[in-house]
Amino acid sequence: MANSLNLATLVTLAIAAALLGHTTADTYIVGGAGGWTFTQNATLYPSFAAQFNFTVGDVLVFNFPTSLHTVATVTRESYDACNFTNPITLIDVGPANVTLNATGEIYFVCTIGQHCAAGLQKLAINVSASSTISPSSPPPASGEGDAPPPPPASGSADAPPPAPLSGGNPPSPPPPSASSRTGIVSIFTIFISLAIYILF
């Protein structure tokens, strides 16, 4: 009886470790509470990119009102030149969730008007391979607890405030975070443990 209990415990731990290894993806809200918008703060998106370590499987949430902004994934050359003739992807309905599925540099721009050319609505991130354990990774960005964006550069006090997120329609909530998925995995692990205990 003791041997089968030890075997059941080992199998349960192995299953739990395998499942928890797949729940390390985080969700990041691009631009924090302000979302993906044309802003007078030229450091907003570079600062956002610098504060996180993005990995394959993470999700970027671009909160923007449809018809006011887009999210295009482009090459480095297109990013630098704000040339959108051949985007890799183009999303014109907001809000948009983008799952990071490759390593390396990824470039996002807004294709509306001069938003990219003004340098105020473009984002470059570096994505690394996913890890099974990420104790040092930061918590996902959310509307709560976000640090306010850095103050505008001097001389821009007369700049108009950024456009509101939407014409009365709040953005939809982001997908479940890794912490909510962990609860589901915990319940599943308990179920598997009970099943193994009964069978052995």
Image: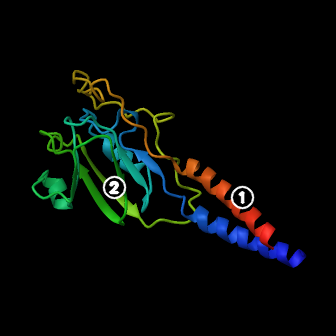
Q: Is residue 89 above or below residue 13?
A: above
Left or right of 198 on screen, residue 74: left
Left or right of 178 on screen, residue 64: left
Q: Amino acid at mark 1?
A: Ile
Q: Quadrant of the N terminus?
A: bottom right
For the residues labelled 2 and 1, say whether their Cβ atoms are less than 8 Å apart: no
Q: CA distance from mark 2 to mark 1?
A: 38 Å
Residue drawn at point x = 23 percent, y = 35 percent: 38
Q: Is residue 105 above or below residue 123?
A: below
Q: Which residue is mark 2?
A: 125
Q: Considering depth in this image, is 28 or 153 the residue closer to the camera?
A: 28
Q: Position of residue 65 (x, y in %)?
A: 27, 34
Residue drawn at point x = 72 percent, y = 58 percent: 190
Q: Position of residue 105 (x, y in %)?
A: 31, 62
In front: mark 2 or mark 1?
A: 1
Q: Which residue is mark 1?
A: 190
